[in-house]
Image (tube, rainbow, N blue to C red):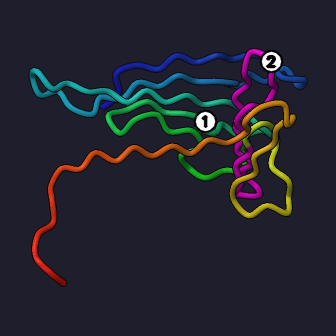
């Protein structure tokens, strides 16, 4: 069920009204005490409205319909600190991934530790017996 729709529109170059963006709210559950909603964001690109992002009980989804839409998150200093290249199905950390990288490309300046993988194991039980 629809809960609400907010549209942003303007006149294009031929004086035709165009909806350029939408925020759409959809009810997922009306059960008392566990009500939930899905919020979807649409943007017009190349003449079509495309769902760019949604918030729901399942979490935050970006590019849920697997369109060729890149995603970039910048840091305070680094532009493109985290980059998803949709056409290459690859992720870059520290910049856009190279086209010759299958999934993950990590870039850095080499002035400090670039990657740290840490694992702490807390034993929860002991094995007994022989093998």
Does 36 sit above or below residue 7? below
> Quarter of the image holding residue 3?
top left
In the image, is residue 85 part of the stretch drawn in magenta? Answer: yes
Secondary structure under the numbered disc 1 in the rendered image: strand
- Inter-mark Cα distance, 2 to 1: 25 Å
Q: Is residue 108 left or right of residue 8?
A: right
Residue 50: image x %, image y %? 64, 39
Q: Is residue 9 left or right of residue 13?
A: left
User: Is residue 31 depicted above or below 100 in this figure?
Assistant: above
Identified at 10% across, 76% down, the residue is 129
* Earlier-in-chain disc, 2 versus 1: 1
**Residue depicted at 15% across the width and 26% down the height:** 34
Is residue 123 left or right of 45 when viewed as pictured?
Answer: left
Relative image position of residue 64 (x, y in whole percent)? 53, 46
Residue under label 1: 52
Nearer the camera: disc 2 or disc 1: 2
- Tag on residue 36? none
Tell me the quarter of the image containing the C terminus. Answer: bottom left
In magenta, the rendered stretch is 71-92
Q: Which residue is mark 2?
A: 77
The location of residue 68, given as percent across then percent down, is 72, 50
- Give the residue at x 43% y 30%: 55
């Amino acid at each position: 069920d629809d809960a609400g729709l907010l549209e942003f529109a303007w006149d294009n170059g031929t004086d035709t009204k165009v909806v350029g963006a939408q925020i759409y709210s959809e009810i997922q559950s009306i059960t008392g005490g566990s009500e939930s909603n899905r919020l979807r964001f649409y943007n017009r690109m190349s003449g079509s409205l495309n769902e760019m992002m949604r918030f729901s009980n399942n979490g935050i989804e970006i590019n849920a319909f697997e369109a060729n839409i890149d995603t970039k998150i910048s840091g305070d200093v680094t532009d493109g600190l985290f980059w998803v290249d949709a056409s290459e199905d690859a992720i870059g950390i520290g910049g856009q991934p190279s086209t010759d990288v299958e999934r993950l490309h990590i870039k850095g300046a080499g002035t400090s530790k670039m990657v740290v993988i840490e694992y702490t194991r807390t034993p929860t039980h002991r094995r007994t017996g022989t093998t």
